[in-house]
């Protein structure tokens, strides 16, 4: 895993080089494209600072990276430069971070993890229908009870049956016995094809499904399945903190992966990343998009080239070595909080390779949760509150939280 750290000057030059390869709405004879640079009444394109602001310059130029540019063949060449940036970003994510073979993947920068997760299920539903002659009612999605809400949303949109597997309340591990039972019941009910979701960090708990236990069961039943990894949260941290991760394309059971730049990377919203093994995108070709050179295979259609450029810039301003150091520093910060919770006798859940801590609600007052914006598992009757050790969280804030948490517990004990 290595990509270089570049100086701000080299990053800036690369961005402006990409912009120079794009068509220019201001200076070229562009009559047929229903797009434009941003409105100059609101976004000033001649501000002096823009010469030192490559992302803002890309944002104002407003390139559209519509289509899937990892596919062979022709593409819209009007935004060739920003497409090249997206391709290199996908290369880093697929090959460097998730160990894909060179060129053995497709993908694109999506609006977020939700879209990327829906894209995966859309691809596999169509794959089973077109390749195996499956009927929609013969296809089911399997995910844990801790999985993201994008999966029930996707099942609703795609008319797919959803099979939810319970988790242990303390360890957050998927109940493998229940998985076996529900697969057996699904087969008895006529399900023949399975789309399986494995969590590489759930949103609330930071829990990670045991991918080998899951696939051992799937393979024991000789199922026809595709496995999608939801690494929306964990994708930019877990591969850097767990050298033995099985969540990558070296694992032959993994079919696709979702990442999200707007979490650990501190990128703008709209920087989800979808990666899938080669030759799967054709299952969602929208043939009616005939006016797009190269066609369209994405859920969103038009996509901001500036967002892909932003993620590329962030990764190269750090480089892989410095990024690994940064993520492991977050683990140290998280471990320090866990040690303090242990000293206070507070019950919590935490995956050792991630920076999320979920505390049982009986230890946290609603007032404290509100003061520090802790997120509950349910706003109706919370059982857990989570805190996340993000880069912007300062030591003083953590100390204040722990101090008030300790005082609250002391008062409770005195009241007894």
Image: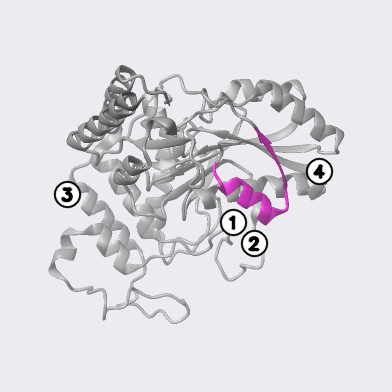
Percent x, y for residue 47? Answer: 16, 71
Residue underneath mark 3: 9
Foreground of the two, 178 or 210: 178
Q: Which residues are magenta?
A: 148-165
Give the CA distance from mark 4 to mark 2: 24 Å
Which label belongs to residue 297? 1
Q: Which residue is mark 4?
A: 138
Point 22% across, 74% down: residue:
44
Is residue 191 left or right of 253 when viewed as pictured? right
Q: Nearer the viewer, mark 4 or mark 2?
A: 4
Q: Secondary structure at mark 1?
A: loop
The answer to whether mark 1 and mark 3 are in CB contact below 8 A is: no
Q: Report if the CB atoms under discs 2 and 1 are less than 8 Å apart.
A: yes
**Which of the two residues, 396 or 264, is positioned nearer the viewer here?**
396
Q: Which mark is residue 286?
A: 2
Q: Are marks 1 and 4 in contact (CB under 8 Å)?
A: no
Mark 1 or 3: in front is 1
**Does the segment drawn in magenta span residue 125?**
no
Task: Name the one closer to the observer, 222 or 21.
Answer: 222
The quadrant in which the N terminus is found is: top left
Q: Residue furthest front?
A: 416
Which one is in front in this view, the residue at disc 4 or the one at disc 3?
4
């Amino acid at each position: 895993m290595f990509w270089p750290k570049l100086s701000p000057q080299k990053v800036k030059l690369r961005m402006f080089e990409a912009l120079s390869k794009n068509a220019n709405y201001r200076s070229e004879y562009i009559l047929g494209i229903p797009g434009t640079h941003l409105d100059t009444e609101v976004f000033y394109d001649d501000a002096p600072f823009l010469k030192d602001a490559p992302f803002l310059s890309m944002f104002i130029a407003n390139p559209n990276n519509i289509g899937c540019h990892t596919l062979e063949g022709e593409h819209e060449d009007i935004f060739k430069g920003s497409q090249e940036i997206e391709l290199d970003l996908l290369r880093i994510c697929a090959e460097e971070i998730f160990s894909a073979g060179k060129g053995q993947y497709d993908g694109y920068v999506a609006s977020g993890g939700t879209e990327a997760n829906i894209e995966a299920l859309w691809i596999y539903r169509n794959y089973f229908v077109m390749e195996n002659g499956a009927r929609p009612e013969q296809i089911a999605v399997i995910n844990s009870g801790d999985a993201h809400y994008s999966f029930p949303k996707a099942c609703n949109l795609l008319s797919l049956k959803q099979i939810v597997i319970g988790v242990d309340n303390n360890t957050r591990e998927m109940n493998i016995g229940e998985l076996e039972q529900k697969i057996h019941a699904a087969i008895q009910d006529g399900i023949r094809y399975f789309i399986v979701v494995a969590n590489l960090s759930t949103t609330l708990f930071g829990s990670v499904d045991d991918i080998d236990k899951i696939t051992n069961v799937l393979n024991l039943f000789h199922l026809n399945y595709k496995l999608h990894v939801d690494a929306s949260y964990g994708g930019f941290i877990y591969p850097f903190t767990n050298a033995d991760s099985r969540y990558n394309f070296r694992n032959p059971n993994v079919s696709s992966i979702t990442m999200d730049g707007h979490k650990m990377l501190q990128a703008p919203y709209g920087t989800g990343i979808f990666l899938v093994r080669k030759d799967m995108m054709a299952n969602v070709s929208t043939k009616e998009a005939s006016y797009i050179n190269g066609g369209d295979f994405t859920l969103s259609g038009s996509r901001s080239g500036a967002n892909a450029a932003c993620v590329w810039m962030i990764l190269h301003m750090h480089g892989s070595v410095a990024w690994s150091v940064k993520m492991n520093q977050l683990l140290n910060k998280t471990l320090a909080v866990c040690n303090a919770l242990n000293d206070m006798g507070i019950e919590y859940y935490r995956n050792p390779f991630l920076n999320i801590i979920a505390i049982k609600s009986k230890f946290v007052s609603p007032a404290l949760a509100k003061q520090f914006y802790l997120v509950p598992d349910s706003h109706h009757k919370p059982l857990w509150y989570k805190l996340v050790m993000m880069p912007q969280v300062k030591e003083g804030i953590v100390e204040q939280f722990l101090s008030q948490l300790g005082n609250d517990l002391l008062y409770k004990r005195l009241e007894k």
